[in-house]
Amino acid sequence: MAVPWRHCWRWRSISSTGCSSASLLESVSALKASRGGWAARALASVPGAGATQGLSSSHPVHTNSIFKSLTRHKARLLYPSAQFCCCKKIHSDAKLKDPFTLAQKDLEHLYDDIKKELFVSREELRSLCDYYFDGKGKAFRPMIVVLMARALNIHSDRDGDLLPGQRSIAMISEMLHTASLVHDDVIDGSDKRRGKSTINEVWGERKAILAGDFILSAASMALARIGNNTVVSVLSQVIEDLVRGEFMQLGSKENENERFKHYLDKTFKKTASLIANSCKAVSILVNSDPEVHEIAFQYGRNVGIAFQLVDDVLDFTACANQLGKPSAADLKLGLATGPVLFACQQFPELHAMIMRRFSSTGDVERAWQYVLESDGVEQTTYLAQRYCQEAIRQVNLLRPSPERDALIRLTEMVLTRDK
């Protein structure tokens, strides 16, 4: 039997996290007194900071409130300090569990199960589809899904073991993610992924597209076998969001005040939607309370956006060997990510470069230098921290469990990763 919503609030442990909605609102309210600047609107997209959250593609991220600049708050920009928002306090007090250790048992046969789903008699197609399922990936998304499923099971008065459908959703999340990578590499003309040549580089673009399509079809069949129409609808939204997000990435906003909203909307669709809706899907299988579904969704949404913000920072701060792909890749693709958009405050010359997608000679090099000379990296990192704080606030509404604590620990791992 699901725990009634009114009981969810008793599991809040604000004193142990230091990340209550009040603290988030206080931090953002303090920004209102700072000097002008459009980029701090980004904070309006963080739930709990006085803005409407983006719940799905039909409820996009809104940035209606115009907050002031983050510039005076450089002392609070904790990059690259080890004191990441409230996480250090949590970890010393609660001794949170290692997420990989807790999820290891359920993920042990993940890639073998995926290969079974992709089994075909044609050897070349099998090699194409198995190429990225070699067990060397981070399995970040299925790990979140497994931990969220087990935390929700405990919250709903069950034991922590995964239901068969929840295990399938973890597998499907990795399949959808990998299919999107295969297609992205074709669109971007990438030749490196996870430290090795991309599928399109080895087998060509046509076969790469077909391999991505086949992985998607196999994931869709696995999804149908779960037998829950609501879960099918929720995870189908992910595929729509991936396509819409890719189209958004192909364009840009002339109005610089709309660029950050466009960037965050695209980030949700391309990265966070998969995590958010996968978390929501596993909650549907175990709990009928829509507000519990929303907790799962919002945790995934906030962690997903933070993950991508950190990824965009690493494009400027990590070397190619760490990333497993070329650095400055986004600039070379003509993409203006968070660090660039924040840097525009100090270097207005970037606006023209953004509109021509860094296509003129020397644009990439100059933009790179402007970002490193600005507060763009620090501001983006700070924004990622705020999203992680909101993820912690959401998951703390669930009943205490090792899995819930591991989901909190995961937010620090998102902020401190170097690849």
Image: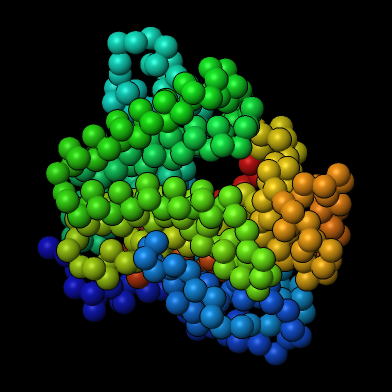
In this view, 81 is above or below 322: below
Q: Quadrant of the N terminus?
A: bottom left
Left or right of 93 on screen, residue 41: right
The residue drawn where x is 33% and y is 39% is: 172
Q: Quadrant of the C terminus?
A: top right
Q: How many marks?
A: 0
Task: State the residue in front, 28 or 329.
Answer: 329
- Where does the image place residue 9, in percent across and percent down from the top left? 31, 77
The residue drawn where x is 56% and y is 34% is: 185
The residue drawn where x is 31% and y is 32% is: 217
- Where does the image place residue 151, in percent across and percent down from the top left? 31, 56
Please identify the quarter of the rendering in which residue 346 is found. bottom right
Left or right of 43 on screen, residue 365: right
Is residue 252 visible to the viewer in this orientation of the structure?
Answer: yes
In this view, 192 is above or below 141: above
The residue drawn where x is 17% and y is 63% is: 288
Is residue 365 visible to the viewer in this orientation of the structure?
Answer: no
Left or right of 383 on screen, residue 62: left
| Colouring scheme, one of rainbow, by chain, secondary structure, one colour | rainbow
Question: Which residue is situated farthest in the left direction here?
Answer: 1
- Where does the image place residue 38, in percent across and percent down from the top left? 69, 77
Task: State the residue in front, 130 or 123.
Answer: 123
